[in-house]
């Protein structure tokens, strides 16, 4: 990983991976049984509607502690206004992690999407250097971010069979699915294992 020379072990810090995702009324594609030569089609009542549920999540790891998942969800119903997660949502998520995680010391690992590179967002770690430092992932490396595993799990389980009529149904399903992930620390550790990163690598970011 590119970035600063912070030694997480020396700070006794949490390594926190931040990422965003979204889901509209059309559910993710999935496999199912069907007659040979005929592609099964499931008609979704709300497929033509506007709007989206956007989520920012942060998956946090620290040796000897149960991994944690924190998130913020925002509903956009079409029309004007903010369409998705913004830099302020990411800032508030970091502040919540600082307040809720024992010790409150964070090493933030994130990619270079636009909202992460906004001036207000890049300034925030510098202004709060006493408890957070930032490390950039390579330019395109979703396979190094365990938060991607959380989104994949959410879409393959809670959302895949959801034929929602309203965004509120999607919103509630997203929150319920993420709440279930919070209580499965072994699965959260599995997302980290899938990246191929070892704890020694994380400590020396």
Image (cartoon, grey):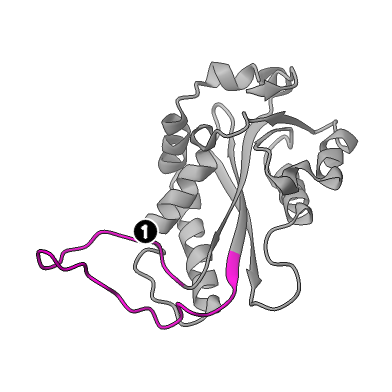
Q: Position of residue 98 (x, y in %)?
A: 74, 42
* Picture layout, residue 139 above or below residue 118: above
Quadrant position of residue 200? top right
Indicate whether residue 30 is drawn in magenta. yes
Judge by depth and name the residue closer to the eye, 86 or 198. Answer: 86
In percent of the image, x 41 and y 51: which residue is there? 153
Residue 129 horizontal side relative to residue 179, left or right: right
Image position, residue 16 (x, y; %)? 63, 36
* Magenta segment: 26-53
Judge left or right: residue 154 versus residue 199. Answer: left
Residue at x 37% of width, y 63% of height: 160
Which of the 4 quarters of the picture holds residue 38?
bottom left
Q: Main secondary structure of the magenta part?
A: loop
Tell me, yes or no, if residue 66 can be seen here: no
Query: Would you identify the image quadrant in which residue 135 lies?
Result: top right
Label 1 belongs to which residue?
157
From the image, which quarter does the N terminus lie in? top right
Q: Nearer the viewer, residue 134 or 106?
A: 134
103 shown above or below 160: above
């Amino acid at each position: 990983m590119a970035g600063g020379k912070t030694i997480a072990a020396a700070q006794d810090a949490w390594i926190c991976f931040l990422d965003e995702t979204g889901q509209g009324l059309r559910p993710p594609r999935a496999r199912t049984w069907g007659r040979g030569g005929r592609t099964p089609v499931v008609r979704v009542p709300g497929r033509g509607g506007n709007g989206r549920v956007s989520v920012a999540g942060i998956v946090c790891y620290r040796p000897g502690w149960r991994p944690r998942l924190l998130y913020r969800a925002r509903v956009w119903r079409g029309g004007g206004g903010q369409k998705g997660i913004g830099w302020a949502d990411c800032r508030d998520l970091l502040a919540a992690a600082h307040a809720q995680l024992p010790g409150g010391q964070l090493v933030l690992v994130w990619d270079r999407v636009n909202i992460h590179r906004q001036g207000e967002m890049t300034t925030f770690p510098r202004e709060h250097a006493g408890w957070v430092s930032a490390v950039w992932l390579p330019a395109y490396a979703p396979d190094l971010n365990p938060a991607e595993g959380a989104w994949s799990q959410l879409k393959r389980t809670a959302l895949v069979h959801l034929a929602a009529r309203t965004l509120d149904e999607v919103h509630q399903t997203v929150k319920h699915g993420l709440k279930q992930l919070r209580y499965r620390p072994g699965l959260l550790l599995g997302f980290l294992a899938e990246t191929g990163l070892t704890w020694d690598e994380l400590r020396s970011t």
